[in-house]
Amino acid sequence: MTFTGSCMCGGVAYAIEADKYTAALCHCLDCQKWSGGAFTSNAVVPRTSFKVTKGTPSSYEAVGNSGKINKHFFCPTCGSGVYTELEVLADMTCVKAGTLDNGEANLGGKVDIEFYVKDRPSYLHAVEGAKQEPMFG
């Protein structure tokens, strides 16, 4: 199955060749800063299944809670966050769900896991049926 997506201006686009993905929310402080919101919503896919098909994203490296690098990729024109590569998940890519085409930002209607729930704002509640992880892993 092919999933596609892009940034807001369409300058950076990608394709994913995968049968499925893991739907994950991350509430860590890094993701809060990265998204400008309370969490990021992600389609986590094998890194080998993800390919940038248009444009060249800019990137920014941040040191995560693990002490390892979180490399964030974004459109140099519109600034949309597109995906993240985590050193602690060297074989996976975390695609920002809002950039997915065809309504896939809905993540198939379910969330598989929430990370860093210890940092989740108190006004949010656990997603029913999603595995709850205080930190990562």
Image (tube, grey):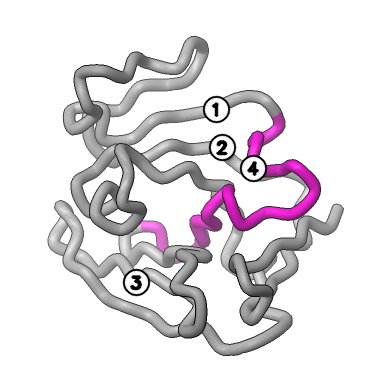
Instruction: Tell me the magenta residue range.
Output: 89-108
Residue displayed at 23% across by 36% down = 135
Amino acid identity at mark 3: Lys
The question of residue 50 being in magenta is answered with: no
Which residue has dot 1 on it? Answer: 111
Q: Disc 4 to disc 3, how far (Cα)? A: 21 Å
Measured Cα–Cα span from mark 3 to mark 2: 19 Å
Q: Do callouts 4 and 3 mark residues in contact (Cβ within 8 Å)?
A: no
Amino acid tagged 2: Ala
Give the residue at the far bottom of this rendering: 56
- Judging by the rendered image, the residue that carries numbered circle 2 is 23
**Which of these two is toward me, 88 or 69?**
69
CB contact under 8 Å: marks 1 and 3: no
Q: Residues within 10 Å of mark 2 (few under 14, many from 20)?
A: many
Is residue 85 visible to the viewer in this orientation of the structure?
A: yes
**Is 57 left, or right, of 61 in this rendering?**
right
Label 3 SS: strand
Sequence-wise first label, 2 or 4:
2
The tag earlier along the polypeptide, 3 or 2, is 2
Q: Amino acid at mark 1?
A: Val
Dividing the picture into quarters, in which one does residue 56 lie? bottom right
How crowded is the residue under tag 3: few (<14 C-alpha within 10 Å), some, or many (20+)? some
Q: Residues within 10 Å of mark 1 (few under 14, many from 20)?
A: many
Closest to the observer, 45 or 13: 13
Q: Mark 4 = which residue?
A: 105
Q: Is residue 111 above or below residue 34?
A: above
Q: List the residue tagged with mark 3.
A: 71
> Tag 3 or tag 1, which sits nearer the N-term?
3
**First in sequence: mark 1 or mark 2?**
2
Q: Residue at x 31, y 19 (%)?
A: 124
